[in-house]
Image (spheres, rainbow, N blue to C red):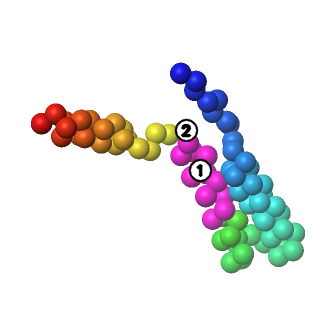
Amino acid sequence: MYEPKREFITTSETILFVSSLFMWLYIVRYFGTVDSAWSILPAVTFVLFLRSFIGRRVDLSFNWAEEEEARKSDQKQG
């Protein structure tokens, strides 16, 4: 079967990463320090990027889909 090529980084992940980078640069440039309350937004944006980026590489389903299919086939048989 045709298996689609996995991208290294998706468009949405790129947008999250670049926007968090520019937010950090803006905060450092105009506020002079990163320890202000404004650092929360780029930090959250970067966490969203990491969650998406790492989540695509790690199987977070723990084979639940396969177990669900096996349970359904067992119910049909019995």
User: Which type of secondary structure does the marked residue at label 2 adopt?
Assistant: helix
Residue at image location 58% in from the left, 26% down from the top: 3
Q: Nearer the viewer, residue 62 or 26?
A: 62
Q: Which residue occupies 19% across, 38% down?
A: 76
Query: Which residue is outermost to the left?
Result: 78
Q: Are marks 2 and 1 in contact (CB under 8 Å)?
A: no
Q: Type of residue at label 2?
A: Arg
Disc 1 residue crowd, few under 14, some 14–19, many 20+, Cα 10 Å? some
Label 2 packing within 10 angstroms: few (<14), some (14-19), many (20+)? few
Q: Is residue 45 magenta?
A: yes
Is residue 19 positioned above or below 4 on the image? below
Nearer to me, 49 or 35: 49
- Residue 53 lies, in percent from the top left, at 61, 46
Which residue of the protein is positioned furthest toward the right in this rendering?
29
Magenta region, residue range: 44-56
Mark 1, residue position: 52
Residue lying at 30% horizontally and 38% vertically, measured from the top left: 69
* x, y percent for residue 58: 50, 40
Split into 4 quadrants, where in the image is the C terminus?
top left
Q: Is residue 46 magenta?
A: yes
Q: Secondary structure at mark 1?
A: helix
Q: Percent from the top left, x then y, of residue 24? A: 78, 64
Q: Can I make out residue 36 in this image?
A: yes
Identify which residue is drawn at 68% across, 78% down: 37
Label at residue 57: 2
First in residue order: circle 2 vs circle 1: 1
